[in-house]
Amino acid sequence: MSSYTITLHNVTHESASAIESSLRSVNGVDYVDIDVPSESATVNSDLTYNEVLEAIRSTGVAAS
């Protein structure tokens, strides 16, 4: 299990909810915490960093 901190760009409370819902439905994601004011996400997952990024980007939010 790896822990990633991902920078989100122009995240809103609504998009943060979409990211959380999307990631929680992905097999291998254990923990998700979105901090809207700091535009960051902490994710504990068996996925690779790039797989987590792609899952976030699939919600329409830019992430790096």
Image (cartoon, rainbow, N blue to C red):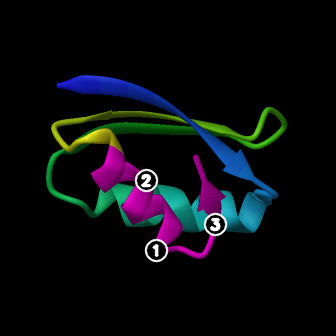
Q: Are marks 2 and 1 in contact (CB under 8 Å)?
A: no
Let me know if residue 6 is in the magenta part.
no
Q: Are marks 3 and 1 in contact (CB under 8 Å)?
A: no
Helix, strand or loop at disc 3?
loop
Instruction: Check residue 16 in the rendering and tell me which mark sits there, or answer none.
Output: none
Residue 10 image offset from top left, x and y in percent:
82, 58
The residue drawn where x is 17% and y is 25% is 1
Instruction: Check residue 61 in the rendering and tell me which mark sits there, or answer none.
Output: 3
The residue drawn where x is 46% and y is 74% is 58
Residue 49 image offset from top left, x and y in percent:
33, 40
Position of 23 with respect to 5 (left or right) is: left
Q: Which numbered disc flags the more N-terminal residue, 2 or 1?
A: 2
The residue drawn where x is 41% and y is 29% is 4
- Amino acid residing under circle 2: Leu
The residue drawn where x is 48% and y is 60% is 56
Residue 28 image offset from top left, x and y in percent:
15, 47
Instruction: Give the answer, above or below, for where 9 lies relative to 55.
Output: above
Give the residue pinned by disc 1. 58
- Amino acid residing under circle 3: Val
Give the residue pinned by disc 2. 53
- Amino acid residing under circle 1: Ser
